[in-house]
Image: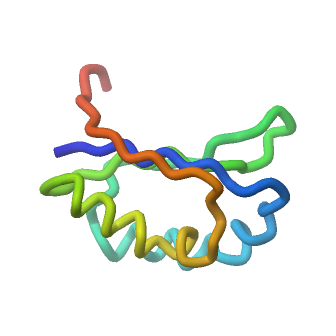
Amino acid sequence: MRVALMTKDKSGALQTRMDNREAHLAYIAETGVVEMAGPVLDDDGQMCGSLIVLEVDDLAAAQAWADNDPYAKAGLFSDVTLRAWKKVIG
């Protein structure tokens, strides 16, 4: 199943994001369940969250993936939402 993982960074946490970006990207590569991903941008064009589409067996697997993301472990996010997602276009 596909799951959309939507996150919002804590205010003023851009440096936390940058400090953990390499580990986050390596985690994406090593786990092999990310179909597409990218940062959400604020009005100034700065990264302030993430949108990640996972291809996993169930919501529990998506939650486990999200919990083990280096960004999550670094305490980057103020809000995390997981929702089943259906691809229609693209």
Image spot of residue 5 (x, y percent): 42, 48
Tell me the residue at 57%/69% (across/down): 71
Residue closer to the observer: 36 or 48: 48
Image spot of residue 84 (x, y percent): 26, 38
Q: How is the image coloured?
A: rainbow
Tell me the residue at 19%/56% (across/down): 56
Q: Is residue 48 above or below residue 28?
A: above
Quarter of the image that includes the C terminus: top left
**Label tally:** 0
Left or right: 2, with 23 as reference point = left
Residue closer to the observer: 6 or 21: 6
Tell me the residue at 55%/49% (across/down): 7
Looking at the image, the residue that sits furthest to the top is 89
Left or right: 76, with 4 as reference point = right
The image quarter containing residue 2 is: top left
Quarter of the image that includes the N terminus: top left
Left or right: 63, with 13 as reference point = left
Q: Is residue 63 above or below residue 42?
A: below
Image spot of residue 80 (x, y percent): 51, 51
Image spot of residue 85 (x, y percent): 28, 34
Residue closer to the observer: 28 or 65: 65
Q: Is residue 67 above or below residue 54?
A: below
Residue closer to the observer: 12 or 19: 12
